[in-house]
Amino acid sequence: MKEFALIFRLKDMADFKPSPEQMQERMNWLGSIAAQNKLVDKGNTLLPFSEHSRTITSDHVVTDGPYTEIKEFISGYIIVKTDSIEEAVAIAKENPIFKVGGSIEVREVLKRD
Amino acid sequence: MTAVLCRHFGLKQIENAEDIASDTFLKASEHWAINGIPENPTAWLYTVATNKARDYFKHLAVRKNQIDDAIGQDETIVDYEFDFSDAMIADSQLSMIFAVSMPGNSREAQICLALQILCGFSVEEIANAFLSKTETIKKRLHRARTHLRNNHFQIDTLSKAAIESRLDTVLATLYLLFNEGYFSKTNKQLIRKELCSEALRLTLVLTEHPLTNIPRVNALLALICFQSSRLDARIDRFGETILFEKQDKNLWDKTLIGRGNYYLVNACNGTEVSRYHLEAGIAYWHTTCGDNKWQHILQLYNQLLLIDYSPVAALNRAFAFSKVYGAEKAISEVEKLDLAESNYYHELLGYLYADMEEISTAIQHYTKAMGLTRSKAEKQTIKQEIDRLTLLSAGAR
């Protein structure tokens, strides 16, 4: 089994706070992974609002909020365990985030000792 | 009785305490058969036990004196007073629950010990409950007892820290004890009411002690109350399991549901959400009939699986999922689960395919389930379902 981080990105701050229905959908997706015993870490939500986030660039310039050059911001992550990256992608595809134009990046975890 | 005697003897002499307890019951069965049951049988038993324990200590003291005289030592003073008051029994049992949940003993060993010492189960009964050979259980118990003795566990001096560090193991023991009774697979008598009521009784002991009357414990007790309320409705007069949906709700024990609600409210003091909270929540929603019931149950199963994966929870989640989103979507959820070795997996698929009116696929799954289960009652229930479906498909043709 390999471990993969699924990193969620959203475009619109307004989508960050889910409606109760969206919350149910998300939980069903997460519950489904857990039911397959493929959830390593239910991860965390990363707050994108300016009072909760800073970006530091190479010349030590500090700005409020997530990295703004790209239009998307990271909203959270989880870690799953699957036999292959294809399987992790298949899991990611079922996430309701795509309904609001979000995206998911799948990255294999290389464990440091 | 064993618990109170151990308080005096120390756990090192648990075998002697148990011998005295069983001698007492033996004497009772002989004496009562001839002279009839005394007016206050409990008091009678405790008097006999006290006398036997005194005799044992005198015998021990005499021997010790003889040896001490020979080597010129002082006489030891032994306290012969035994207090079998309700408070002392509750206290001793509480200590004993923690004693058997000693770290270092495996979980299985802890449950075995609890069943034997606190609930008076025979080795055979325990072996049945665990689907193990009696020899395995004997060995397991022996190792666990040796471990108890060698660690000089003091039964009457439980510190707050010790209670905190062991409470989770204690709760796990009680939880498994209850489940063993509630979902008993091996015995002909499908529901081991005894195991369930023992788990209830021991958990109640915990809620009655200020140090252990915490949210988690109340949540477990609520769960046990809710589940127990359905004990009578779960089984028909031929000893067969009745599925939840077909149960006569009038048979549900309203008093126990009321107790469950009471302890669940207690459990919600504070912010803690343990697996027992979630499971008690699920059991609570089962006792209701509102519109959103299954959505609530599904969400609670989602959360439960995030805390702790188990195949049973995964399958129950899928069932709740089918209640909210229908059989078709649920089938794809179930088929993602890697549980093809479980009879419940195939039973659920059988149920869902039957719902989709894909009768032959349903029958295939039920047949697989029948081959996988060890329970006679369950085989019978599945057989009936297959017969019903076969008739249905013949009628359709």
Image (tube, coloured by chain):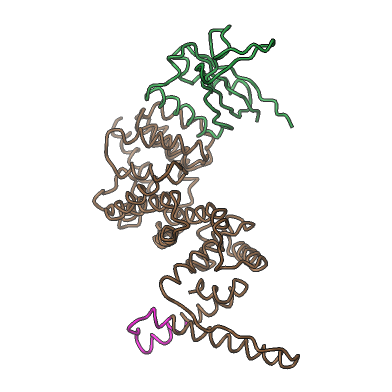
How far across and down, in percent of the image, does residue B23 sit?
A: 51, 81
Give the residue at the far left of this rendering: B250
Q: Colour of chain A?
A: green
* Main SS category, magenta section: helix
Residue B38 magenta = yes
Left/right of residue B109 with respect to residue B88 in the rendered view: right
Instruction: Tell me the magenta residue range.
Output: B26-45
Residue drawn 52% across the image and 37% down it: B340
Q: Is residue B303 above or below residue B250?
A: above
Q: Is residue B296 magenta?
A: no
Chain given the colour brown = B
Residue B237 against residue B355 in the figure, above or below: below
Q: Nearer the viewer, residue A106 or A88?
A: A106
Residue at the right extreme of this rendering: B71
Q: Residue at left 50%, top 78%? A: B22
> Of residues B376 and B278, which is closer to you in this image?
B278
Residue B267 placed where, x, y %? 40, 48
User: Image quadrant for the C terminus of chain B?
Assistant: top left
Locate residue B144 relative to residue B51 in the image: left or right: right
Q: Is residue B285 left or right of residue B97?
A: left
Image location of residue B150, percent across then percent down: 67, 67
Q: Count the numbered circles shown.
A: 0
Task: Name the quadrant containing residue A108.
Answer: top right
Residue placed at 40% from the left, 27% from the top? Answer: A24
Please state if A75 lies on the left or on the right of B360 as rendered.
right
Image vertical order of residue B396 relative to residue B18, above or below: above
Q: Where does the image place residue B293, in percent across and percent down from the top left? A: 32, 36
